[in-house]
Image: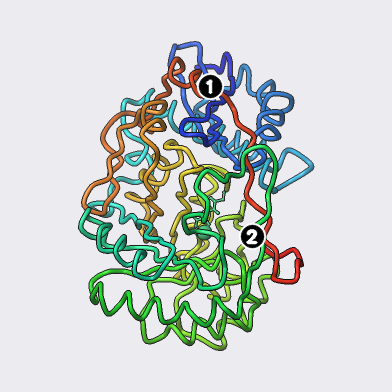
Amino acid sequence: MRITGARVIVTAPGGLNFLTLRIDTDEGIYGLGDASLFGREMAVKACLEDHILPSLIGLDPARIEDTWQMLYRGVYWRRGPINMTCIAAVDMALWDIKGKALNTPVWNLLGGRCREGVMGYGHASGRSAAETLENAHAAIESGYRAVRIQSRVPGIEDMYGVPRSAPGRDSIGSPWTEPGWSSAKYLASTPGLLEEARRQLGDDIHLLHDSHHRLTPIEAGWLGKALEGVRMFWLEDATPAENQASFRLIRQHTTTPLAVGEVFNTVYDALALITEQLIDYIRTSAGHAGGITGLRKIAAVAEPHNVRLGCHGAIDLSPITVAAAAHVGISTHNFAVVEAQQHFTESHEVIPHAWTFADGYLQPGDAPGLGVDIDEAEAARYPYVHRYAPYARLEDGTLWNY
Ligand code: GCO
Ligand code: MG
């Protein structure tokens, strides 16, 4: 079999941009991969179209590892989100082709099932603690066993992870600003929110929380310590992790489990975190960390260090990345949980899939390959939109981490 063509399909169902790579072969089998990268979509498209796709024509699609190494090791400029998202898309499409060619699901090629389902965590958020907890009860009623709890902090109008003050105010067009972040206010209210969540939701529910890079390492240590009585499943992205040594400091102060790495692209971004056992969960996704091959390399390093995968699965990653997580998750021993934020209805229509999510667990299904497709007529109904994450600023106007 030979690769005869490859192209990128851009669509924004529900207003979120998805990039899908389709690789065609001379035997009529095609594979799909997710190339979505929120806020930098067109850079990924250009990198694929101008630099990567021409080099794939004529290659044997069965040579997944060799192609991965060619695009990673064979190119002078390594790592980085744009490059690794491109590699991810190619890699997923090749696994999809291999599964279809052998008429078996990708999870079977990865070693077969090692669990009955992949636990997914839901989101509960609100503009008050009461609203957040009401939504958490609803998430549990809908079947989730693990829930991420985020609430607006009194005194901060708009912040990551909670409904906006003015619905309709949006990030379309150009980046906009979320002013008034205060770590002091956040730290004053967050332990109480999670204590109340534990009290109301009981001991059987896994509780998660995402600080979204807002804290300094010592503040993160304080928060982790303050949350120890809650027995959190994890505290996510407590501090930015470019400096992996930050986590040594956090670890000295708290036994609250730590998750980090949705913005990482390779195992090297987390090597010290993993080998020094400074974190408990690595958040890398197939979509942003070199595909199924990239994720497996990370899982292999993490396994002997007691670090488990807890993949990023926000709705700006397409249902193809969810499929990849389902196939890796069902067949990888140290896979703990996947973020299972519910996609918009339009996203399911544009990218139909064999994976299902019910009673808190993701199932990859039995379809050959990744079990995904793209309806290009539907996709064409949702043109690209300029959309960015906001800029966070402190109360005095200083730019802060979003
Ligand atoms: C999460 C993430 C997302 C990201 C988003 C960026 O834990 O789900 O933090 O909400 O902010 O995916 O593109
Ligand atoms: Mg996050």
Q: Nearer the viewer, residue 365 or 140?
A: 140
Q: Amino acid at mark 1?
A: Ile
Q: CA distance from mark 1 to mark 2?
A: 35 Å
Q: Is residue 31 left or right of residue 360?
A: right
Q: Quick one: 59 or 191, which is closer to the camera? A: 191
Q: Which mark is residue 260?
A: none
> By what rule are the colours in the image chosen?
rainbow
Front one among 192 and 282? 192
Give the mark, 1 or 2, whose residue is nearer the N terminus. Answer: 1
Determine the residue positioned at 67% across, 76% down: 245
Mark 2 Cα-neighbour bin, 10 Å: few <14, some 14–19, many ≥20: some
Q: Position of residue 352 (x, y in %)?
A: 35, 28
Query: On the image, numbered disc 1 is attached to which residue?
Result: 23
* Label 2 lies in ligand 1 vicinity (Cβ under 8 Å): yes
Which residue is at a point 58% across and 81% down the rendered structure image? Answer: 250
Q: Which residue is mark 2?
A: 402
Residue at 43% x, 19% y is: 378
- Badge 1: few (under 14), some or many (20 or more) residues near its Cα, within 10 Å? many
Q: Amino acid at mark 2?
A: Tyr
Q: Is residue 259 left or right of residue 72?
A: left
Q: Residue at x 39, y 50 (%)?
A: 341
Q: Nearer the viewer, residue 399 or 76?
A: 399
Label 2 residue SS: loop
Relative to 321, say whether 390 is above or below.
below
Q: Quadrant of residue 179?
A: bottom right
Observer-side mark, 1 or 2, equals 2
- 397 relative to 264, above or below: below
